[in-house]
Image (cartoon, rainbow, N blue to C red):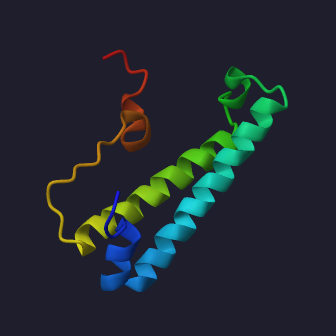
Amino acid sequence: MKGASVSDLIVAKDAALDMEIKGKLDATMAKMAVLVSNARGGEAYDQMIGEGNKKVMDAIDALVDQTWFIEKEVAVLGLSSLEIEGSDGLDAPEKVGAGG
């Protein structure tokens, strides 16, 4: 592929935002790396998602945080057709497990 990257386009309009999103992406990768490391160390998925598992929630929180910055990038670029779908588990946790 040829042409400007999303980062190039953001830098041209808001260099500080570009640095922020790169930091958010790095944070997400670091949180995900913890999960990968634990899995390679023998921790099963059901153990990772057990109640109160901070490592998994940290990874989810990092993903949610980076999503807000991606939405800021969309606004800076003047894009209007992008839609980021939410999740009942994150956006409306009271709906999860409510039986419909």
Q: Residue at x 36, y 39 (%)?
A: 92
Q: Is residue 18 above or below residue 31?
A: below
Placement of the C terminus among the 4 image quadrants:
top left
Q: Nearer the viewer, residue 96 or 62?
A: 62
Q: Nearer the viewer, residue 33 or 98?
A: 33
Number of numbered callouts drawn:
0
Residue 64 in sight from this viewpoint = yes
Placement of the N terminus among the 4 image quadrants:
bottom left
Q: Residue at x 37, y 62 (%)?
A: 70
Q: Nearer the viewer, residue 96 or 45?
A: 45
Residue 65 point in image, percent of width and height: 48, 59
Q: Which quadrant would residue 78 be assigned to in this image?
A: bottom left
Q: Residue furthest top?
A: 99
Residue 50 point in image, percent of width and height: 68, 27
Q: Which quadrant would residue 17 be assigned to in this image?
A: bottom left
Q: Residue furthest right?
A: 41
Residue 74 point in image, percent of width and height: 27, 65
Q: Is residue 92 above or below residue 44?
A: below
Q: Is residue 97 above or below residue 5?
A: above
Q: Is residue 32 above or below residue 72?
A: above
Q: Residue at x 18, y 64 (%)?
A: 79
Residue 54 in sight from this viewpoint = no
Q: Residue at x 37, y 67 (%)?
A: 5
Q: Residue furthest front?
A: 2
Q: Which quadrant would residue 90 be assigned to in this image?
A: top left
Asked whether, in this view, residue 59 is left or right of residue 82, the answer is: right
Q: Nearer the viewer, residue 19 or 71?
A: 19
